[in-house]
Amino acid sequence: MLPLERILEIKSKETGSFPNGDDSYFKRYEQIKAYLSKNVYKYIGAGTSAEDQGVYTDHSIDHFNEVILFAGKLLGIEENNKVDEYADKLEISPYEIYITLVSILLHDAGNILGRDEHEKKTFQIFMDMGDAICSDKFEAKPIASIAEVHGGEITLSDGTVSKDTISKLNNTDTYHSIIFRPRLIAALVRFADEICESRNRAARFLLKQNALPEWSQVYHRYADSISSVIVDSGGGCVNLKFEITKKNLVETYGKGSKDNIKQVYLIDEIFARLEKMYYELHYCRRFMIGTINIHKIRASIIIYDENMDEIENKPIELEEQGYPSGLSCLKTKHSEWCGEVLYEKYK
């Protein structure tokens, strides 16, 4: 049992912390996980491949378990053998733990129906579990909505497209008089998923046999290069270790889609993904601040020769520096309130 799951099991006995004083939330969580493991996760690979014949990184139960593990680490659970000690120290409530865990289980489940807009298929999958597991649509919908904003885009009222999916959720919400924080939970799930990447998710056998579709190559090569991801909650940092051979450094790998393949160097993909991870941190942090205080990304990129001797080690650090820039221009945002307009209005 993973640390965050164990804490839910402990806290589920505190019936006053759950809607209607219900003591069955841990059992319900186990049923949801068992259902998805049996009926969904094992077929995600087939679902994504059927859409575009690509081979994508692992979406088995192992991936979802790893996201749960990292969510616990982001919340400050650092030692698996002392889980009980953390039960009363977490900055989220027992019901929020339940919502977090279920949202993680659901966040990529929509891939079984294809990768395209998979995050929008969550509620359908949740309701398909039946009344025994998901008896109230008014509880299920907010949880599905949290799971859905781990990625994707939304169209705003003015027609523009935005990646700011979390802001569409309520800051706080209630279910049967129990308060929970959708934006906080969504940001936790989203960032835990973002840092949950390692060589465990790569199709290593297919990499060695050069048997991957060309447009899927770099995604697996990137995952295979990550040997370690450590969350230092006390230091406010996520530490990554990349290990690549000189041979893989000088080759290019395909990415994109079957009809639009681009060749890229692995180091360029690593830089791009680190930048994306930092953007995700910068975005999610505004919703997590005060509960989860990660504020920087550190990485070491190590290059090895053909004898696996280290020949170069590049440290990378991403965090806010200097004076803020790129802030919203109020005069542009509220153009009807600029000096010239108000002068003409009130002169």
Image: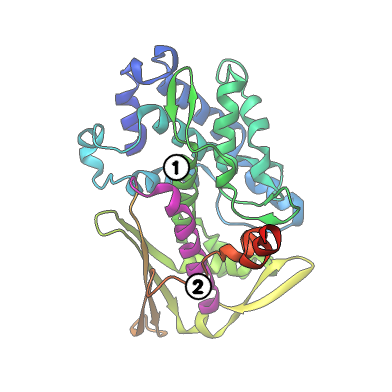
Q: Is 244 included in the stretch rendered in magenta?
A: no
- Sequence-wise, the earlier of marks 2 and 1 is 1
User: Are circles 2 and 1 on residues that touch, CB within 8 Å?
Assistant: no
Q: Nearer the viewer, mark 2 or mark 1?
A: 1
Which label was assigned to residue 233? none
Q: Is residue 262 above or below residue 58?
A: below
Give coordinates of residue 150: x percent, y percent: 55, 47
CA distance separating discs 2 and 1: 28 Å
Q: Is residue 200 visible?
A: no
Disc 1 marks a residue whose amino acid type is Leu
| Residue highlighted by disc 1 | 184
Which residue is pictured at 44% across the width and 57% down the height? 195
The reply to whether residue 3 is in sight is yes
Residue 191, position in %: x, y? 46, 52
At horizontal 55% and vertical 38% (from top left) the residue drawn is 146
Q: Based on the displayed image, in which of its 4 quarters is residue 324 positioned?
A: bottom left
Q: How many marks?
A: 2
**Which residue does the numbered mark 2 point to in the structure image?**
270
Residue occupying the point 54% across, 45% down: 60
Give percent across and percent down for residue 49: 71, 52
Magenta span: 266-291
104 relative position to 214: left or right: left
Return the residue found at the far front. 347
Give the SS element for disc 1: helix
The quadrant in which residue 259 appears is bottom right
Q: Nearer the viewer, residue 238 or 41?
A: 238
Check disc 2 and give the amino acid type: Ile
Above or below, comparing residue 162 to residue 96 in the picture: below
